[in-house]
Image (cartoon, grey):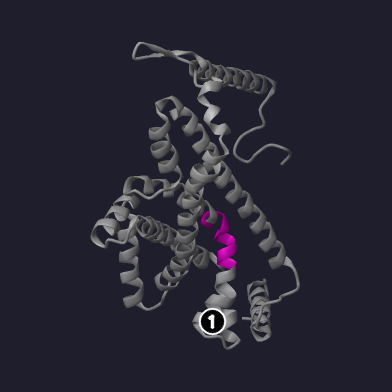
Amino acid sequence: MSGSSVLFDAPGPKARRNSLISSIIAGVLILGGLAWIALTLAAPRESGGITLPGYFDGSRWEIFSDSELWSFVIFQGVAGTLRAALTASVLALVLGVLLSLLRSSEIAWIRRPTAVVIELIRGMPVLLMMLFILLVLSTGAFWAVVAALALYNGVLIGEALRAGLASLPRGQREAGLSLGMRPLQSKMLVEFPQAFRQMLPIIVAQLVVLLKDTSLGFIVGYPELLRINMNNLSSFYGNRYLFSFFAITLVLYLIMNLSLSWFARWLSKRTASKSSGKRLDPDDPNQAILVAEANAAARQSEAPGGAH
């Protein structure tokens, strides 16, 4: 086959022309919609018989020249968000590893109750878990937010890791067991690192969701970014600056989430380059030999005509 796809023929001149025209029209409509939104926000508006300037007017942004506002209040919200997100992320990863091991256990009385717990947590809204932990267990707002986020995201991370373990070739485990490893040792040293690298994009995407879900702490009274900016500050300075605080909050969330996504891509490339290399450098040399031999034996058993 030449350049055509197996699903459809290559577009002809008329189809390419129609596609170009459609793209141009869609681009013009999108730009027009963005221009309309910008003009609407920039236009003066009436409120209680008073004409207020547009949202882009300098008088709505003058308070942000105060360094104390940035250092003491706004970044207090950023610190609160990152503190809750970091604590919940660590707990979620630990819980995810534990649940993936229990869920993939060959012992039915361990696997089935774990599956019930996982489905129960997955079906419960995160905000409801926060309220339950806060009101029933009286943990305080911080631990209510952290515990709920760790439980919910830990379950999802655990399912992702379990899927990664299930997708590995069976020869990986068989090779580890043939070298004298115990099942748990084979899973942790041979299978789990591969599953973690394979599921890393999904895990990081879930951590981004976790970071954004810290905003639910607004409801339980935790002083995170959204509550500090959109509730405390807007109440103190007045509704005149509500849109300004909204825009600043949005930008700060974007910076945090995009930074986490960039770190995930960097980490994925780094771990991929390490796993494709020939050199292993774990802390325990004996484990390094076992891992290398298990991987080599797995590749040999999976190769056509390999030993069986």
Disc 1 target residue: 185
At horizontal 37% and vertical 49% (from top left) the residue drawn is 217
At horizontal 23% and vertical 60% (from top left) the residue drawn is 136
Query: Mark 1 belongs to which amino acid?
Result: Gln
At which x and y percent is residue 4? Answer: 68, 37
Q: Residue furthest right?
A: 278
Q: Nearer the viewer, residue 261 or 277?
A: 261
- For label 1, the SS is helix
At which x and y percent is residue 41? Answer: 49, 19
Q: Nearer the viewer, residue 289 or 206?
A: 206
At which x and y percent is residue 171? Answer: 58, 75
Does 21 appear above or below 9?
Answer: above
Q: Quadrant of the N terminus?
A: top right
Q: Is residue 137 left or right of residue 126?
A: left
Alpha-carbon neighbours of circle 1 within 10 Å: few (<14), some, or many (≥20)?
A: some
At horizontal 58% and vertical 81% (from top left) the residue drawn is 176
268 magenta-colored: no
Q: Residue furthest left?
A: 136
Q: Nearer the viewer, residue 55 or 85?
A: 55
Q: Nearer the viewer, residue 49 or 298?
A: 49
Does 77 appear above or below 179?
Answer: above
At which x and y percent is residue 52? Answer: 44, 15
Q: Main secondary structure of the magenta part?
A: helix
Q: Residues in magenta?
A: 194-203
201 magenta-colored: yes
